[in-house]
Amino acid sequence: MDDRLFRNAMGSFATGVTVITTENEEGIHGMTANAFMSISLNPKLVAISVGENAKMLEHIQKAKKFAVNILSADQQKESMQFAGQLKDNPYEVSFTTHQGLPIIEDSLANVTCELHSQYVAGDHTIFIGHVTGVILTERDPLLFFQGKYRDLKELEQQ
Ligand code: FAD
């Protein structure tokens, strides 16, 4: 099958946008990810999928914990910063701490996790996190659809 066809079809699944954060002796590391899902209510488990070339892979394996910061509509710059899209003009991001993990301030929600298990699947590793804490606000979400950032208002007008 053609790679582009596969990517275009997967990109037609509209998602929110998260930044995964973790910290080890090398410092705080963040990575933008939309491959995020809720897995189980009891126990509370979530999953993320990290590419084999992403530095985040080793950072999570070392730290054995990570946070999922679900971005709000006004955090497109944060998403671009942690996707490596602002290298020429880095955007300063404010972190705070929750359950011993760095989290991004003013997110729509923050979910902190201890690493539960990991599974290599092709060129990605799926990390399952056991949820240790949640912060939830009432902001609108940042959305991603067909390779572009979107917001709820834009979709309502269509
Ligand atoms: P790097 O490329 O080193 O880091 C990413 C960027 O974050 C760099 O610019 C770095 O300077 C910055 N950064 C890291 N830590 C800090 C810090 N403490 N303070 C300030 N800046 C910092 N990839 C996946 O594997 N899975 C996904 O689900 C996924 N979803 C994506 C969704 C979207 C909408 C986008 C745009 C990209 C997605 N990617 C995904 C791609 C992924 O975000 C990039 O490939 C990313 O560059 C990989 O990061 P890295 O861990 O290799 O680290």
Image (cartoon, rainbow, N blue to C red):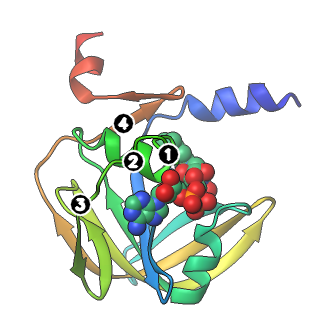
Mark 2: secondary structure = loop
The residue that disc 4 covers is 143
Quarter of the image containing the N terminus? top right
> Where 98 sits versus 16, above or below?
below
Q: Which mark is residue 90?
A: 2
How far is disc 2 from disc 1 in space, using C-alphas? 5 Å
- Can residue 31 be seen here? The reply is no
Residue 129's spot in the image, x, y percent? Answer: 47, 78
Residue wearing tag 3: 109
CB contact under 8 Å: marks 2 and 3: no
Disc 3/disc 1 C-alpha distance (Å):
26 Å
Indicate which label's residue lies in the foreground, 4 or 1.
1
Q: Is the shortest distance between ligand 1 and the CB of mark 1 under 8 Å?
A: yes
Classify 10 Å Cα crowding around label 1: few (below 14), some (14-19), many (20 and above): few
3 or 1: tag closer to the N-terminus? 1
Cβ at disc 4 under 8 Å from ligand 1: no
How would you rate the neighbour count of disc 3 (Cα within 10 Å): few for under 14, some for 14-19, many for 20 or more? many
Q: Position of residue 91 (x, y in %)?
A: 33, 48
The image quarter containing residue 137 is bottom left
- The amino acid type of the residue labelled 3 equals Ala
Q: Quadrant of the C terminus?
A: top left
Cα–Cα gap, marks 4 and 1:
22 Å
Which three-letter amino acid code belongs to the residue tagged 1? Lys
Q: Earlier in the sequence, mark 4 or mark 1?
A: 1
Residue behind label 2 places its C-beta within 8 angstroms of ligand 1: yes
Vertical relation: 145 (above or below) 70: above
